[in-house]
Image (cartoon, rainbow, N blue to C red):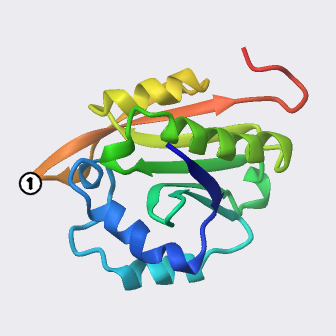
Amino acid sequence: MNYTIRPIEPRDAEGAAALRRMPGVFENTTGLPSCRTADSEAFIAGLGPDDHNFVAVLEDGTVIGCAGLTVCSNPRMRHVGSVGLYVHTDYQNQGVGTALMKALLDLADNWLMLVRVELEVFADNERAIHLYEKLGFEKEGLLRMTTVRDGRYVDDCKMARIRIPGEALT
């Protein structure tokens, strides 16, 4: 499978919206089933200098994954970024999520000099947690009843990866 990871562009809005609504992806996001292409267009148009979003796209332009890193705008927290990721169900467990996360972490480590990269993941999303742990993230806490999913409240797991610039990851 040949795909490219590149910064998100306005032409990716339809594919990103379709991913957010996709069964097998949607349940692990905080989106709503009413997500429209216009919502993705507005999101992309509203990205600012602290937002760094990438897509994984096939040669025909099909979006198969999206990942984003947002640097905290508070001056006292400029060393912190938060990430999010989702991958098309047909391309999960094939390295797409790992490649997208590595692109975000390269940016965080080598260009933005972030010390802390954090995320929240549904506590029952074992595959995603495994991916994040493989990339050096550690569980920091359980956030109870954070999100409604399928008519029930579910828990989030707070995870983070700490890296002091110039030091090797352990």
Q: Residue at x 60, y 58 (%)?
A: 54
Task: Name the spot of residue 127 as percent of width and height, x first.
Answer: 36, 29
| Furthest residue toward right | 166
| Furthest residue toward left | 151
**Which residue corresponds to mark 1?**
151
Taking the image as shown, residue 71 lies to the left or right of residue 75, namely left
> How would you rate the neighbour count of disc 1 (Cα within 10 Å): few for under 14, some for 14-19, many for 20 or more?
few
- Against 35, residue 125 (above or below) is above
Question: If the image is split into quadrants, where does the C terminus sit?
Answer: top right
Task: Name the spot of residue 16 as percent of width and height, x first.
Answer: 42, 67
Taking the image as shown, residue 41 lies to the left or right of residue 53, namely left
Q: Which residue is drawn at 69% across and 38% down?
A: 116
Quarter holding residue 166? top right
Taking the image as shown, residue 139 lies to the left or right of residue 53, namely left
Q: Residue at x 53, y 58 (%)?
A: 57
Q: Which of 56 and 42 is in front in this view?
A: 56
Quarter holding residue 110? top right
| Furthest residue toward top | 170
Taking the image as shown, residue 17 lies to the left or right of residue 95, namely left
Q: Which of 62 and 119 is in front in this view?
A: 62
Q: Please tell me whether mark 1 sits on a helix, a strand or a loop.
A: loop
Task: Name the spot of residue 112 as percent of width and height, x first.
Answer: 82, 50
Task: Name the spot of residue 4 as percent of width and height, x first.
Answer: 61, 53
Q: How many numbered badges does the structure rendering display? A: 1
> Disc 1 residue type?
Gly
Q: Which residue is drawn at 44% across and 34% down?
A: 94
Q: Nearer the viewer, residue 127 or 116?
A: 127
